[in-house]
Image (cartoon, helix red, strand yellow):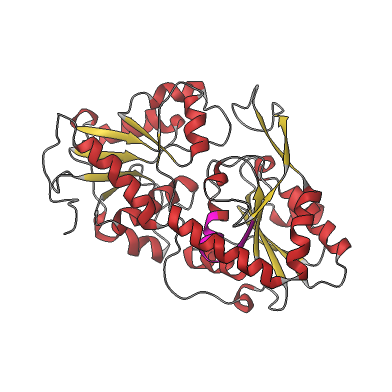
Amino acid sequence: MSDDVPITLIGHPWSPIGMGEGLRQQLRACHAVGLRPAVMDIFRYTRCSDPAHAALVGADECEVAGPGIRVFNINGDEVEPVLAAFAERGGKIEDGINVIAPAWELPAYPKPWAKQLGRFDEIWAMSDFVRDSLAASGLTAHTIGQAVQAEPGPMLSRRQLGIRESAFVLLHFFDLSSFAERKNPQAVLALFASLRAAHPFADLQLVLKVKNGERGGEDWAGELAPDPQVKLLTAPLDSLGVRSLVNACDCFVSLHRAEGFGRGLGEAMALGRLALGTAWSGNLDFMRPDNSLLVDFRMVALKPEDYPHGEGQNWADPDIDHAARLLAPILADPARGAALAERGRRGVLLSHGNRAVGLRMLDRIEALAARPVQAKPSSRARRRR
């Protein structure tokens, strides 16, 4: 690849949402292979409140992307307003090679959004599942994946997080402002109740991290989590808090119905924590029976209210009894779980560490840069020597 082809990552670099993390993990992956992209905050609606985000993006933020390769970390429903904002800021979409990296969680990408993705020169998929979802709507994509490698640095302790130090801790993340049916927290509560009944003397604790839980989280807990061994965390956490929380658990649990990638599972594995997840959708890019706990499921049809654009589609209904059976020998022999978690750590860093994802990005960037029409060189985002 020419060292003079500028690269710009465009999206929501300061936002705590999934698409924001998608951009940030791409930036870390680029740094791991010697690329120094510029970063463009397309809407500028989020303040930088996380020190880790400021340290990562730093001086690489730019006002507008010039010619070169631009990677838009946005979804299909954002394309129109994003391209309008790009033009208002002085950007010229025709002056560069434009890539889009969307997210989706169902087997077929929405047809109305697919038309918008067709305006880009290339599509990057976060998993083979998303690649196949795009293919079902007539779009070709390249699987890049997402980097899940944790930033080095100190961690908060269990005591600082209010988690019992002696317990075997299960952790689950979900978002009250989104469609909770997809994350399926009720199944996690049912699993925990089953474990408590089957192992009445085991020292178990379930931690539920609820995004937007400060608005209604306690009501949700009162209805669905009466067990005193269930700890609900509703306050927003920065990067250090989230990383520490994952590090503090023994097993990250995701009895999801569908995942575009399954970032929480991957991050837990990268930190050497055991991962238990539904054996379906994006997480199968890095979860296998020999490195994690994969839960059986049956496919069920979505109801109209379950998820946007879900008409005629199916997703997984995980087997809670099977999940409990998978955890039983781990509770009886923690060393068995530790060995499985270590295999998971090695495997996920090989396939989805910063360098692994960065190399896949570099392959595509080199292919794009080799196209006949080249962007003008810029010193803004040269490859480091």
Compared with 207, 381 (above or below) is: above
Q: Residue at x 62, y 75 (%)?
A: 158
Q: Position of residue 318 (x, y in %)?
A: 73, 43
Residue 13 seen from this side: no
Q: On the image, which quarter does residue 342 sit in?
A: bottom right
Quarter of the image with the C terminus is bottom left
Q: Nearer the viewer, residue 348 or 47?
A: 348
Instruction: Residue 268: say if magenta.
Output: yes
Magenta residues, as a range? 266-275
Q: On the image, which quarter does residue 312 sit in?
A: top right
- Left/right placement of residue 31 relative to residue 18 reads left
Q: Nearer the viewer, residue 187 or 62?
A: 187
- Left/right placement of residue 248 relative to residue 361 reads right
Compared with 340, 125 (above or below) is: above
Q: Residue at x 11, y 38 (%)?
A: 376
Residue 34 seen from this side: yes
Q: Position of residue 180 (x, y in %)?
A: 67, 43
Instruction: Residue 247: say if magenta.
Output: no
Q: Position of residue 52 (x, y in %)?
A: 40, 64
Quarter of the image with the N terminus is top left
Compared with 80, 33 (above or below) is: below
Q: Residue at x 81, y 67 (%)?
A: 228
Residue at the limit of the structure toward the front, as seen here:
290
Q: On the image, which quarter does residue 214 sit in?
A: bottom right
